[in-house]
Image (cartoon, helix red, strand yellow):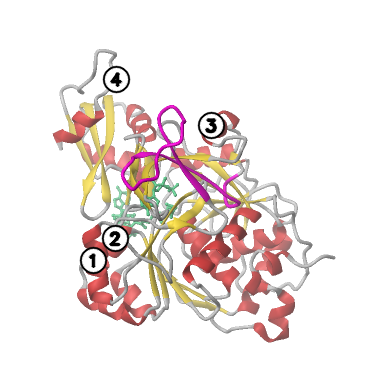
């Protein structure tokens, strides 16, 4: 038998090392539960024994020990995990399960589970050693929104995760001496890949605070903190909580633009200029400011090790990297996804044969290689509280409601969420009914914060809704 997987992807969980004295009693703290490294290896290997051979399994990714063990167990067994949003609604869940071909719910399950259920037992133990799966094999299939249609499954290999985590460990000087704290969802790249898997790879302690509240961050006593800009903005508004973070080593923001006033306020209260990093589900994290480098407010930094970037104009020709020219950002590196599950057409639209990924973001690069993200190419991809939400998927759901004749969804600037989802509807349904309907069908975090009933939608001569005009109506 070759070395175990956990020894390769999740280095700190190498069973031989753990048995040889590299155990720590508080490797993962989540809710009221504290797991040692040997707890994790033993309980997750026991999970591996029960899922081994499955093609893919779904994990309802609540922030619980069961989720940590389920995902770790699948990584040990080499079974790709489909993390399902903890607040998922019925239509989105149906789509994710059908599209992914997941064969079972592992760990927690929805009340009306639609697949066989494999429970996770916190106190079960196995010390079986698993062969190392191929680095090109899939570790995760994470569902993410496009501008139209239902979410697509982003296939992420073990190799990509390892490459990205090593690049970030270098950029952030992230080591086993750190204690990483966050309270983000465990079904997206930020909370799951960077937060949980990053800790298990670097060997840092991991504390999940349940929710990312200022008080919980202040009390956690970590060295390294992750948050989306909404989290940092709430911390910046809570002086006592912010000051408590002054004893940390590094505060990291990502998943959406960090407003400069928030950067400044966090810096003033904590004594730490936040590190900002940029990425996506498809590319993982490709750009970051560095622990030992300039942290320039409004800029997301330099390519992390292994990453190349380029700017291209509308014709695909190279654009100037002069600190002023705004053009499409493309990235290439070992951390890129393999493609969208079952969607070679959609994959070919964004991932070229020569390895360049078209991010859908427009950016500026200065002569030192610093990057500033200017915005997205499409108004139909909304970032709200760090969640990526497609206007099209919400419009489709709204149009499925009896009380809706026409619907158009936009993201409007919001001090707390970055963008707030607003739906304009022609019809006779009550706004609060429609908000609840989207929460129930898609997921709670995709619900419009506001629904406005209007007589008609502004359209151009072709009948296309004028979304820029709509945002001016708010
Ligand atoms: C409200 N609630 C409802 C509801 N309305 N429930 C059912 N139906 C309705 N109609 C409930 C919710 O369930 C929740 O309950 C509570 O109200 C609050 O929900 P909320 O208002 O949505 O929470 P909010 O405080 O606004 O959330 C802010 C946030 C969240 C920052 C905590 O947006 C968040 O976690 N963002 C992180 C997103 C992220 O991790 N993105 C990374 C993507 S990866 P309860 O019981 O739960 O309180 C990526 C790559 C990269 O982008 O670069 O990182
Ligand atoms: P997701 O697939 O949810 O990870 O969303 C990826 C998108 O989030 C990117 O394409 C960007 O539009 C946005 N994003 C992530 N990090 C940043 C950042 N630091 N600044 C600006 N936008 C960001």
The answer as to whether callout 3 falls within 8 Å of ligand 2 is no
SS class of the residue under badge 2? loop
- Residue at (55% x, 44% y) in the render: 154
**Distance from label 1 to label 3 (Cα)?**
39 Å
The answer as to whether callout 1 falls within 8 Å of ligand 2 is no
The residue that label 3 is drawn on is 346
**Distance from label 2 to label 3 (Cα)?**
34 Å
Indicate the quadrant containing the N terminus: top left, top right, bottom left or bottom right: bottom right
Label located before the other in sequence (1 or 4): 1
- Residue at (40% x, 55% y) in the render: 368
Q: Nearer the viewer, residue 347 or 278?
A: 278
SS class of the residue under badge 4? loop
Question: In terms of image quarters, where does ligand 1 lie?
Answer: bottom left
- Residue at (46% x, 40% y) in the render: 92
Q: Is residue 187 visible?
A: no
Label located before the other in sequence (4 or 3): 3
The residue that label 1 is drawn on is 264
**Distance from label 2 to label 1 (Cα)?**
8 Å
Label located before the other in sequence (4 or 2): 2
Residue 216 is situated, as x and y percent measured from the top left of the image, at 34, 74
- Residue at (38% x, 56% y) in the render: 300
Report the disc number at residue 297.
2
Q: Please say whether residue 374 is one of the residues in the magenta stretch.
A: no
Q: Nearer the viewer, residue 304 or 351?
A: 304
**Distance from label 4 to label 3 (Cα)?**
23 Å
Say which of marks 1 and 3 sits in front.
Answer: 1
Horizontally, is 234 left or right of 474 in the view? right
**Distance from label 1 to label 4 (Cα)?**
41 Å
Tell me which segment is drawn in magenta: 308-337
């Amino acid at each position: 038998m070759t070395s175990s997987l956990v020894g390769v992807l999740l280095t700190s969980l190498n069973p031989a090392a753990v048995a040889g004295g590299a155990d720590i009693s508080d490797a993962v703290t989540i809710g009221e539960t504290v797991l040692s490294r040997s707890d994790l290896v033993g309980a997750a290997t026991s999970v591996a024994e029960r899922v081994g051979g499955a093609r893919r399994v779904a994990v309802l990714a609540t922030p619980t020990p069961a989720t940590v063990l389920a995902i770790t167990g699948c990584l040990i067994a080499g079974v790709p995990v489909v993390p399902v949003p903890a607040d998922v609604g019925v239509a989105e869940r149906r789509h994710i399960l059908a599209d992914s071909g997941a064969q079972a719910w592992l760990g927690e399950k929805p009340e009306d589970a639609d697949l066989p259920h494999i429970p996770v037992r916190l106190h079960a133990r196995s010390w079986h050693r698993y062969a190392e799966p191929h680095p090109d094999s899939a570790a995760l299939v994470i569902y993410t929104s496009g501008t139209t249609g239902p979410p697509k499954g982003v296939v992420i290999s073990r190799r990509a995760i390892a490459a990205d985590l090593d690049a970030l460990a270098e950029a952030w000087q992230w080591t086993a001496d750190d204690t990483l704290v966050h309270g983000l969802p465990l079904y997206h790249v930020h909370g799951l890949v960077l937060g949980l898997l990053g800790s298990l790879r670097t060997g840092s302690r991991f504390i999940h605070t349940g929710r990312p509240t200022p008080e919980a961050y202040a009390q956690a006593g970590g060295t390294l903190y992750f948050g989306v800009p909404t989290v940092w903005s709430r911390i910046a508004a809570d002086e006592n909580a912010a000051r408590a973070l002054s004893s940390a080593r590094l505060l990291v923001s990502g998943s959406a633009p960090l407003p400069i006033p928030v950067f400044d306020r966090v810096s003033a209260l904590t004594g730490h200029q936040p590190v900002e990093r940029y990425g996506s589900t498809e590319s993982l994290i490709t750009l970051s400011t560095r622990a030992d480098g300039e942290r320039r407010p409004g800029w997301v930094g330099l390519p992390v090790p292994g990453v190349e970037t380029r700017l291209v104009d509308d014709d695909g020709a190279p654009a100037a990297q002069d600190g002023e020219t705004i053009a499409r950002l493309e990235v290439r590196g070992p951390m890129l996804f393999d493609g969208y599950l079952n969607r070679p057409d959609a994959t070919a639209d964004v991932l070229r044969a020569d390895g360049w990924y078209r991010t859908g973001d427009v950016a500026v690069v200065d002569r030192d290689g610093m990057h500033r993200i200017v915005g997205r190419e499409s108004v139909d991809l909304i970032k709200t509280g760090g969640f990526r939400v497609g206007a099209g998927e919400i419009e489709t759901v709204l149009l499925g409601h009896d009380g809706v004749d026409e619907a158009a969804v936009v993201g409007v600037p919001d001090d707390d969420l970055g963008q707030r989802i607003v739906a304009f509807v022609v019809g006779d349904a009550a706004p609060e009914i429609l908000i609840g309907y989207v929460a129930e069908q898609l997921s709670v975090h995709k619900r419009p914060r506001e629904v406005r009933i209007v007589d008609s939608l502004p359209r151009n001569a072709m009948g296309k809704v004028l979304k820029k005009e709509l945002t001016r109506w708010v």
